[in-house]
Image: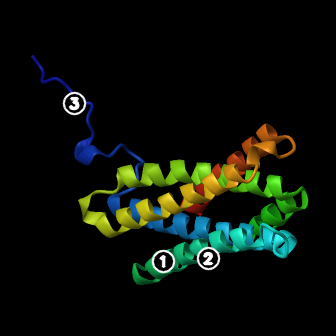
Amino acid sequence: MSAAKTTTPVGGRMPGDPTREELIERIIRVDQAGEYGAVRIYQGQLAVLGNGPKGDMIRHMKQQEDVHLDTFSKMVSERRVRPTALMPIWHVAGFMLGAGTALLGEKAAMACTVAVEETIDEHYQAQIKKLGDDEQVLRATCSKFRDEELEHRDIGYAHGAESAPAYPLLSRAIKFGTKLAINLSEKI
């Protein structure tokens, strides 16, 4: 009789799966890109709504995103992680998304915030599950920033996101674009 074949890959990795080092690099690269995109979204919203009643609230969220971006930018430098080559695209796309939704009105800007932050919540949750005890600092950073992203989501809901024109369509489109940006930024 022959020995039964095992279906568990050696080291728990399937062919094509990233190594532990590659996984950490992808996490840091995509999180830096995502936080950069978030800063640009809020800059776009502020360009349109900055002098209105929502200006201070948007500035508060942007300030938190600035801290997130600074943190991941330091990790990119300290760990010698290659940033995404797509940063010039996220520079323009983030600002256009923020300004474009703000031009549709305050509620549409809040709908943008909710859609992005819900997607980022799922993204951070998945990363946190993948990070082990060897990456306690990175895991704690992702957890802390996830909590702040959820605060932003809640602010968006509290300020009428669901009352935005064509909310379901707008939300789905922004979530799709955010997921696409995440997938591309991990690899490129």
Percent of width and height locating residue 106? 83, 58
Of tags 3 and 1, the one toward the viewer is: 1
* Helix, strand or loop for disc 2: helix
Q: Residue at x 59, y 68 (%)?
A: 35
Lower position in the chain sequence, tag 3 or tag 1: 3
* Helix, strand or loop for disc 1: helix
* Residue carrying label 2: 63
Figure check: 84 above or below 2: below
Question: How much space separates mark 3 and mark 2, taking CA atoms?
Answer: 51 Å
Lower position in the chain sequence, tag 3 or tag 2: 3
* Residue carrying label 1: 71
- Residue 82 visible in rendering: no
- When asked about the image quadrant of residue 169, the answer is top right
Nearest to the observer: residue 82 or residue 30: 30
* Helix, strand or loop for disc 3: loop
- Residue 105 visible in rendering: yes
Nearest to the observer: residue 10 or residue 112: 112
Percent of width and height locating residue 89? 74, 68
Percent of width and height locating residue 167? 80, 42
Which quadrant of the rendered structure holds the N terminus? top left
Q: Circles 3 and 1: CB distance less than 8 Å?
A: no
* Residue carrying label 3: 6
Percent of width and height locating residue 175? 68, 47
Q: Amino acid at mark 1?
A: Thr
Figure check: 113 above or below 65: above
Q: Amino acid at mark 3?
A: Thr
